[in-house]
Image: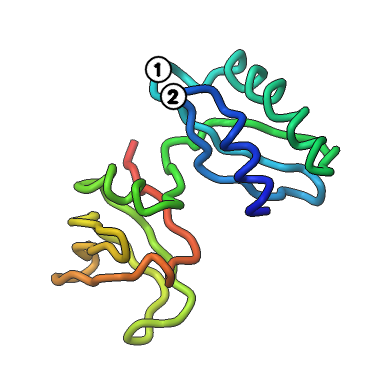
Amino acid sequence: MQRLAQVVEGSLPEGAELIEARFSGGPLLTLLVDREDGPVDHEFCSRIVSLVSPVLEDEGYGGMIEVSSPGIERPLTKPEHFRRFVGHEAKVRIGEPLDGRRNFTGTIERADEESFVLKLLEESGEVELPFSSVTRAHLKEDI
């Protein structure tokens, strides 16, 4: 998966970013893509499919590809995502429990190269979590 993600990232147009790549329902490769210069609409998604399909085939993947927006509860998959969304609420799940907990919800206070700090919403206080411990994280936006 990591190799396929690298190939996809290398074939995206300038201003576009791969947020997450995952297999959904068997061989369906789902790509969550965002862009700086406009909406992630049907036209943009179609363009991405036409750009990444040939390079994925060259890597041996000939399955179906789905491209979509990361949505309002955008996944946070890289340290730069946490830095970009300082001040926003996030839900985070870690692999190994910390003080008996794996799930945390809070406001991203700060982030560096190795870890980030959440100001917890459920109770007072904050927690520092290393990126290496995160199994899933996404923005928590109220509509």
Give the quadrant of residue 56.
top right
Q: Are marks 2 and 1 in contact (CB under 8 Å)?
A: yes
Residue at x-position 18% and y-position 69% = 126
Give the quadrant of residue 57.
top right
Question: Which of the two residues, 92 or 134, is positioned nearer the viewer here?
Answer: 134
Q: Is residue 113 left or right of residue 41?
A: left
Residue 24 at x, y percent in the picture: 71, 48
Q: Is residue 63 left or right of residue 41?
A: right
Residue 61 at x, y percent in the picture: 82, 42
Disc 2 versus disc 1: nearer the observer: 2
Residue 28 at x, y percent in the picture: 77, 43
Upstream in the sequence, badge 2 or badge 1?
2
Crowd rating for badge 1 (residues with CA inside 10 Å; few <14, some 14–19, many 20+): few
Residue at x-position 40% and y-position 70% = 103
Residue 131 position (above or below residue 81): below
Question: Which of the two residues, 73 or 44, is positioned nearer the viewer here?
Answer: 44
- Residue found farthest to the bottom: 99
Q: Is residue 51 left or right of residue 62?
A: left
Residue at x-position 57% and y-position 28% = 12
Residue at x-position 34% and y-position 36% = 143
Q: Mark 1 highlights which residue?
A: 37
The amino acid at mark 2 is: Gly
Q: Secondary structure at mark 1?
A: loop
Residue 14 at x, y percent in the picture: 47, 23
The amino acid at mark 1 is: Asp
Q: Mark 2 highlights which residue?
A: 15
- Residue found farthest to the top: 43
